[in-house]
Image (spheres, rainbow, N blue to C red):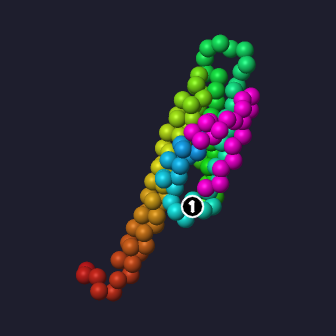
Amino acid sequence: MNINIKTTGLELTDALEAYLHEKLAHVEKFITESERAIARAEVNLAKTTQHHKNGDFFKAEITILLSGRSLHASANKDDLYAAIDEMQDEIISEIKRWHGKRHTLLRRGGRRIKNMLRSINPWKRQ
């Protein structure tokens, strides 16, 4: 998977980049092998404000483009690492939901074809 990282209002340190790659490696497990070759992830890490002393002021967003579909997740937290963790959980649930929908549509199409074949079967008992 091709990963593009963008930061706003903060510096991308080696430790932060390693942590982010570790979390995205876990996300890659939920993407099929054929999709992994063409998948592209765009990650935005930002500090949303400079003057607040408390509250959620770190934002982590991810957009994964795969098979003509765009999956998006974002999280706001008071700790950047916590925002990355929440973003990871949200994008994993989005990927699972999308794979479930795709599987359901495939089954529905197969069921329709099977019913059509049953209706034209000449050996069907009446």
Q: Say if residue 94 shows up in the picture.
A: no
Q: Position of residue 8 (x, y in %)?
A: 74, 32
Q: Which residue is rendered at x = 72% and y = 29% of the image?
A: 10
Q: Residue 47 occupies which quadrant of the picture?
A: top right
Q: Position of residue 40 (x, y in %)?
A: 65, 53
Q: Amino acid at mark 1?
A: Glu
Q: Residue 53 occupies which quadrant of the picture?
A: top right
Image position of 19 with respect to 97: above or below: above
Tell me, yes or no, whether the highlighted magenta stretch contains residue 2. yes
Q: How many marks?
A: 1
Magenta segment: 1-19
**Residue beneath disc 1:** 35
| 16 or 7: nearer the viewer | 16
Q: Which residue is rendered at x = 47% and y = 49% of the image?
A: 96
Instruction: Find numbered disc 1 in the image and state the secondary structure of the residue it sits on.
Output: helix
Q: Position of residue 125 (x, y in %)?
A: 25, 81
Q: Residue 6 occupies which quadrant of the picture?
A: top right
Q: Say if residue 30 shows up in the picture.
A: yes
* Neighbours of disc 1 within 10 Å: few (<14), some (14-19), many (20+): some
| 100 or 112: nearer the viewer | 100
| 63 or 52: nearer the viewer | 52
Residue placed furthest toward the bottom: 122
Left or right of 117 in this view: 16: right
Residue placed furthest toward the left: 125
| 102 or 78: nearer the viewer | 78
Tell me, yes or no, whether the highlighted magenta stretch contains residue 38. no
Q: Position of residue 11 (x, y in %)?
A: 72, 32
